[in-house]
Amino acid sequence: MTSNQLGSRTIFIIIIAGVALILGGLVISQVTPLIFPVQASAESLQIDNLFRIALVIGGAIFLLVQGLLIYSIVRFRARAGDTSDGINLHGNATLEIVWTAIPAVIVLVLTVLSYQVWVSIQSVKDDEMTVKVTGARFAWSFAYEVPDPRDTSQKLTVNSKELHTYVGRPMKLEMVTQDVIHSFWVPAFRMKQDVMPGRTTTVRFTPIQTEETYPVRYPIKCAELCGSGHGEMVNWLVVHKDEADYMAWFNQQLDLVLNPPEDPVARGRQVLASGAYPCAGCHVLADLGWAGLTGPSLNGVGDRAATVRASATGLSPEEYLDRSIYYPNEYIVPGFGAGLMPQFQANDPQGANYMSLDDHFAIVAYLCTQTSTGESACDLDRLRSLVFGNS
Amino acid sequence: MATVSLPLGDAPSAPRPRLRVSDYLRWSVDHKIIGVQYMVTAFFFFIVGGALAMLIRWELLTPTMDVVANGSQYNTLFSVHGLVMIFLWIIPMMAGFGNYLVPLMLGAKDMAFPWLNAFAFWLIPPAGVLMIASWLVGPPEAGWTQYPPLSTLFSGDGQTLAALSVHLLGISSILGAINFIVTILNMRPEGMSIWQIPLFCWAILATSIIIVMATPFLAGALTLLILDRIAGTTFFDATRGGDVLLWQNVFWFYSHPAVYIMVLPGMGILSDVLSVHSRKPIFGYKMIALSSMAIAIVGFTVWAHHMFTSIQPELRIPFMITSMIIAVPTGIKIFSWLGTLWGGKIRFTTAMLFSLGFLSMFVIGGITGVMLAMVPFNIHVHDTYFVVAHLHFVLFGGAVFAIYSGVYHWFPKITGRMLDERWGRLHFVLTYIGFFFTFFPMHFAGMLGMPRRVAVYMPEFQGLNTVASLGSFVLGISTFILVYNAIASLRAGKLAGANPWRALTLEWATSSPPPATNFIGDPVLFDDPYGFGTPAASDYLNAIDRRFGAPEPGAPAAPRPAAPAAPQPAVGD
């Protein structure tokens, strides 16, 4: 259409503008550390760096577009009294090819860089620690499987409601869900993976040294809408300084599993505290630091079982608490929704929502002690016969 | 290159058509009435969806739950907000513009299938009732994405009604799209090739092709969802042989193209407005037209980037590549629009301000879109406020800004009166500022670790959320300035004349509002819809003024060149 010869002045302006845009992009990209959480995994270093590159380019494009826009608005604004039209220009083939080709090259570069980072963070590392993760409405739980020290041909499971690991140890999580889709996300690690019914998904990461004092706690959040308690579905990831510190924690947990307290109340408290069941996601329980909002509070539940619930249901406190776990929809506390609590069962150890009779007995025994006096509201012998039958 | 036959024939004395409210409340096959019915209905739902957004932002002023009683209520707020804004506001609003403008732009008397057109519209009110009823029956709380098994096994009965509502809206959308395709391809006047139709028509054509191809997939997915909910099937129940990813794949196979269903018509509006108000031909007509088609086609290959944290890891890279490719045609449009401004005589009408606002905000949505396509970064920000920010920059900074721009641009044609420009500028300034401060901080909240769809969040995010909430309240207020402006201008706005903006497309070559048959006699076509800056264009525009009447003195219209020395008397005066 018009002559495509570029004058030396035009070339000069293009070069100056190009350098200015790249410098501008570099300046903008300096905010990168401010808009990410602490970098606490090997993956976070790579991903933040990739973002920084994208922000240099994106920042330059932002400045280019806004710059051209503002320049055009000022320079080509219609002056008062000017009734004429602009120039009758319909296009410029060279320019159109340039602004098709340059974005194509940019996205090609970003694609290649992203691919490289992706391959790296996905790769299987040596000496991975495998932890099984279960998402349930509205809490995460973690299970460490180790050989049973009493009989090394058997596996022993140590449950925890916190995910413990240590600096430098590559982690591999094998994740399932008990109910709906959840998404395991540790913002400080930049890693996220959905957990889906019918599948086992994996996520890998390696904690790195940061400037904090150990052990460090990072939030684990649910990033996929899972229902009313979605926002409260937060557990903690604890990074120990080194393997020795981690093993000290782990051996303590292992000892609790190997030598459970004889007292059913103490054992029930330990089972609940381990996060083996997702109760913390929905209930408040000051004794264990729970703060869920979806279900009724368990503070003082023993008192209520003996008073208002007993009069509402006609059940003794131990009957009421016993049935509330197996048949949660039989009686719904006013103000709360039905169908939200998992229906636990003791028949099929492989099935969903399995809770052994031992655990069940201990948990109810513990809940019975949630009274203002600390005295159990229940008759433990009756509870034992309710749970285990009369045999 | 432009030629025109002058003078433009005689002017049979047709009285200025009067608009009667009662015409809009009943069945009509007139595309102009249907177009307005679409727009007013959609705007009503914009207010509904906006009110829900205000409640959401009110709740998020504090990190704890205080406005809503429980998480389910909050989930219902944003679920219905999303469904209403997408299916009852943006998509029907764009259909309203298309209905009103496409036949006029093509010099046609109506759409190809007028009865079908009315039928498609009248599916919307019952669908809207179903959507609102869903709230009362039992809250749909699975988000607008309705992922099973949350939507099938847990959400309230309202979920079924919401799905039925979207089903109806999908049928409406498909019927409307078929009508657009047939109209655009078959009803152009003698002498208008496909390369001479306004770019708005190209955008509607591309959009309609997407709708016809994609919406049946949504219908299929919704049918399975409804069956799972009410008939005991297990398509999405993994414990009984179903698969939750089936929903995600089919849903996004529609819903990613749906983004373009919402944005492409806006881009069409922008192409027309930017050219007219900068008094300069659109830069690279063919590239803009073809890039719409490229987006329509490539848009079908990118759906799984909404599933980067759920699909098999091996499949993520291919979808990253396609998602990157689609940035290129979008970039072409942005640079073509900038090229259109260059060398123009830019007039800062409110319509133009909103189009310029679109340009400056949409580019942010484009950049974050490319960032989201990068799998490793996406893994971090997936399902966080970063995505909420991105999608609102595209759908509000893009589609809604374009809608506003189109309202200010075509209101004079539709009603015969100009909108007030001072109120318009205030509307723009508040919208622009309110929008930016509502959604820009969300990028940071998401990157720093705030998931989306939560009523409670960690206290460290309160600062960002407070800014967003305050911005959103400004945005909410700004909407009512437009409502006031529209009502006041309908009663007492300056008379617009046929062609207040001195545009060259055919909808302006007839009186405002147009007569029932759109044109008295054959419309006179100017053969380049964007051929500004030529004497022929000036002559044509002057002839339009003489033939149909110029705007009332003092109307905020484009200035007229000084009267020619010897005005040609139009025959028949």
Image (cartoon, coloured by chain):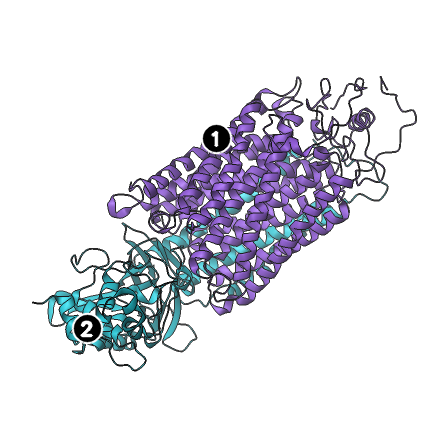
| Amino acid type, residue under disc 2 in the picture | Val
**Rendered position, B194 above or below A286:** above
Q: Answer left or right for A12 relative to A249.
A: right
User: Neighbour class for label 1 at 10 Å: few (<14), some, many (≥20)?
Assistant: some
Mark linked to residue B559: none
The furthest residue to the left: A391
Label 2 marks a residue whose chain is A
| Amino acid type, residue under disc 1 in the picture | Val
User: Neighbour class for label 2 at 10 Å: few (<14), some, many (≥20)?
Assistant: some
- Nearer to us in this view, B168 or B424: B168
Q: Answer left or right for B86 relative to B561.
A: left
Identify by letter the chain in purple. B
- Nearer to us in this view, B295 or B268: B268
Quadrant assignment for the C terminus of chain B: top right
Q: Which residue is mark 2?
A: A257
Q: Answer left or right for A159 relative to B176.
A: left
Is residue A12 visible from the viewing direction of this image? no
Kindly indicate the quadrant of the structure image that contains residue A355: bottom left
Q: Which residue is mark 1?
A: B212
Residue A95, percent across and down? Answer: 64, 38
**Rendered position, B67 above or below B344:** below
Q: CA distance from mark 2 to mark 1?
A: 60 Å
Q: Secondary structure at mark 1?
A: helix
Quadrant assignment for the N terminus of chain B: top right
Q: Secondary structure at mark 2?
A: helix
**Rendered position, A301 above or below A104:** below
Label 1 marks a residue whose chain is B
- Write the residue at 61% across / 52% down: A62
Identify by letter the chain in cyan. A
- The reply to whether label 2 and label 1 mark residues of one chain is no
Is residue A179 visible from the viewing direction of this image? yes
